[in-house]
């Protein structure tokens, strides 16, 4: 009996072992039939083409002849960004990704500053930023140092100011530029074509003065709708002060008209950096600075009207509001935290007694009315009329104005009602890109009407077009070089001067500009006999680029 039980148990165990081995083999065979060894799929032709277009070799002007790949379709940036069910403004539309453009980014999608700085250096080293400009003749300089005067005449050449001399340094300047303070070197470097040269050796000293030098005087600047002060330094330099009124992340209220918007100190700073990145150099240098409202304004001002507007808020912050046309009241007061306030300081241009400026009404000026439209908004052939009106009927004035339009569209500045030029140069000079405080108000919506002059006239200079195309490439991406450039400002230590959505909006708007130009080119190819869209402004380089003989 026991023997029979043992045989039966052994048979059951062997059967179970066989079944187990069979099941394992069956599972292994099933796994092998399903599993496929991993392999990378070959890149699609579209990606290869995008990589080929993005691998730009900086060999000269001819390397950027064709439009970029991402400008063949119309950008959707002229519509509002998506909103959630509660009506809150959502994030800005995602930018089109170019193959090979994505590197190591932080959680916000921002590229590390080290990479951005290398892109910025590479951009400024590019031939498009280092080609010689038009020859600067003697009459092309705004100011010149007077020749040596006799000793008897030196007393009449002494510098004079209207405030106490005790706060100012002794004047020891002579005809040598080494003896001049940075602001004077800046004034003497202004020419018919630009406010300062590329790779200006004076720029570091000038921005350092704006950011750190002791302020000896602060008075209100007359005119304008919002508070502005003129700050003076011991070396007789002066800067235009605009205070912080909005947080970095704030967007302009959608219910406000463009003429009701506040001026932003970070917009003035960012406009200077963007203007330089575009290769214009027509915005005076601007630096951010943290000021002590008591020690650096109230205690030193000789402007009694300004001093009377200082008060302490209910939470103990120092506030003031000054006097101006609209936004100077206790309701629009500027307040410190508790006594420190961020501001932008822009170097002042030469006094009007030395270099008069002419103010020009913009042909595409807005109506500044809640109901009335301007002519350019209703007349389809408006640009043809502008082209027959001086000074837009000859020279480069229209091209210079389009440069300004591109700058305004990129930073969403709708408040360009006038522009200025130096009277000495007549009509043959670049425009001054002044007063940019209402820029960078909205990042989640673009304003296509700013581009109306470009769309209606279909005209842009070649160097501007090539630089815009360069900034659309991954290795020179506009948002990356802008982020890196702004990081050099002293206020960057507190917080980035432009929030990431504003930087993303720059790339989006740049694509819109490129698409607009491409659309103009297609239209002109249909309209036989029309002017070329891209004006060749490199004629002065042909003798330099063509080998002798």
Image: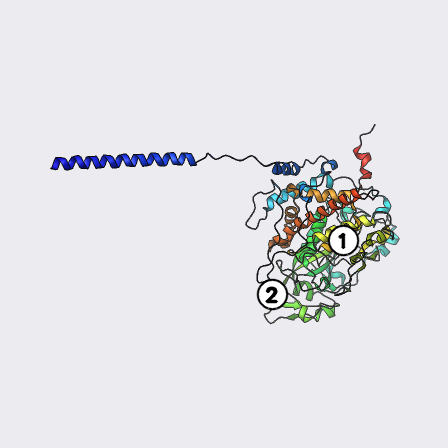
Identify the image quadrant of residue 21. top left
Asked if residue 120 is positioned above or below residue 92 in the image, the reply reads above
Q: What separation in Å lies between label 1 and label 2 (alpha carbons)?
A: 44 Å
Residue linked to disc 1: 452
**SS category of the residue bearing label 2:** loop
Measuring from the top left, give residue 281's x and y in whole percent. 75, 48
Q: Position of residue 487 (x, y in %)?
A: 63, 50
Residue ranking furthest to the top:
549
Q: Nearer the viewer, residue 40 or 415?
A: 40
The x, y position of residue 271, in whole percent, is 70, 53
Q: Nearer the viewer, residue 62 or 455?
A: 455
> Are there few (<14), some (14-19), or many (20+) residues within 10 Å of tag 2?
some
102 relative position to 305: left or right: left
Image quarter hosting the N terminus:
top left
Residue 83 image-quadrant placement: bottom right
User: Disc 2 designates what residue?
Assistant: 338
Q: Relative to 520, say whether 9 is above or below.
A: above
User: Counting other residues with Cα less than 10 Å from the Cα at mark 1, is it few (<14), some (14-19), or many (20 or more)?
Assistant: some
Judge whether 252 appears above or below 130 on screen: below
Is residue 330 or residue 219 the one in the foreground?
A: 330
Q: Residue at x 66, y 46 (%)?
A: 478
Q: Is residue 29 visible?
A: yes
Question: Which residue is at a point 68% across and 46% down the rendered structure image?
Answer: 73
């Amino acid at each position: 009996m026991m023997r029979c039980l043992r045989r039966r148990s052994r048979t059951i165990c062997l059967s179970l072992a066989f079944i187990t081995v069979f099941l394992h083999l069956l599972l292994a065979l099933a796994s092998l039939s399903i599993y496929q060894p991993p392999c990378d799929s070959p890149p699609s032709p579209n990606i290869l083409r995008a990589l080929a277009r993005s691998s730009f070799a900086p060999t000269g002007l001819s390397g950027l002849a064709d439009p970029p790949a991402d400008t063949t379709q119309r950008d959707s940036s002229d519509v509002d960004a998506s909103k959630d069910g509660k009506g809150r403004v959502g994030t800005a539309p995602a930018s089109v990704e170019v193959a090979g453009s994505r590197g190591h980014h932080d959680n916000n999608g921002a590229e590390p500053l080290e990479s951005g700085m290398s892109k910025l250096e590479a951009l400024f080293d590019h031939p498009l930023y280092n080609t010689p400009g038009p020859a600067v003749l003697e009459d092309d300089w705004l100011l010149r140092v007077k020749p040596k005067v006799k000793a008897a005449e030196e007393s009449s050449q002494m510098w004079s100011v209207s405030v106490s001399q005790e706060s100012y340094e002794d004047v020891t300047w002579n005809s040598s530029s080494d003896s001049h303070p940075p602001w004077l070197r800046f004034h003497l470097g202004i020419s018919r074509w630009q406010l300062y040269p590329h790779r200006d050796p004076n720029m570091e000293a000038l921005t350092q003065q704006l950011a750190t030098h002791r302020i000896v005087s602060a008075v209100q600047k007359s005119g304008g709708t919002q508070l502005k002060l003129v700050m003076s330094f011991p070396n007789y330099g002066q800067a235009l002060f605009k205070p912080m009124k909005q947080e970095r992340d704030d967007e302009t209220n959608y219910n406000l008209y463009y003429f009701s918007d506040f001026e932003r100190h970070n917009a003035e700073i960012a406009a200077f950096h963007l203007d330089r990145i575009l290769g214009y150099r027509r915005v005076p240098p601007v630096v951010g600075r943290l000021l002590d409202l008591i020690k650096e304004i109230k205690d030193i001002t000789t402007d009694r009207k300004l001093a009377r507007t200082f008060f302490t808020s209910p939470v103990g912050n120092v506030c003031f509001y000054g006097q101006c046309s609209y936004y100077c009241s206790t309701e629009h007061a500027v307040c410190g935290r508790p006594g420190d306030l961020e501001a932008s300081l822009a170097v002042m241009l030469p006094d009007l007694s030395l270099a008069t400026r002419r103010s020009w009404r913009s042909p595409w000026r807005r109506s500044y009315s809640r109901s009335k439209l301007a002519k350019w908004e209703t007349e389809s052939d408006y640009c043809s009329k502008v082209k027959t009106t001086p000074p837009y009927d000859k020279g480069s004035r229209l091209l210079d104005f389009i440069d300004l339009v591109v700058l305004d569209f990129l930073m969403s500045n709708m408040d360009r009602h006038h522009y200025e030029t130096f009277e000495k140069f007549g009509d043959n000079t670049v425009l001054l890109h002044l007063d940019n405080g209402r820029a960078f108000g909205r990042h989640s919506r673009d304003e296509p009407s700013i581009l109306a002059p470009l769309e209606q006239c279909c005209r842009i200079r070649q160097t501007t077009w090539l630089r815009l195309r360069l900034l659309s490439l991954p290795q020179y991406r506009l948002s990356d070089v802008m982020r890196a450039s702004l990081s050099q400002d002293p206020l960057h230590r507190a917080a980035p001067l432009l929030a990431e959505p504003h930087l993303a909006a720059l790339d989006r708007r740049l694509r819109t500009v490129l698409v607009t130009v491409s659309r103009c080119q297609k239209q002109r190819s249909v309209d036989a006999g029309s002017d070329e869209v891209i004006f060749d402004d490199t004629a002065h380089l042909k003798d330099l680029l063509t080998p002798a003989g």
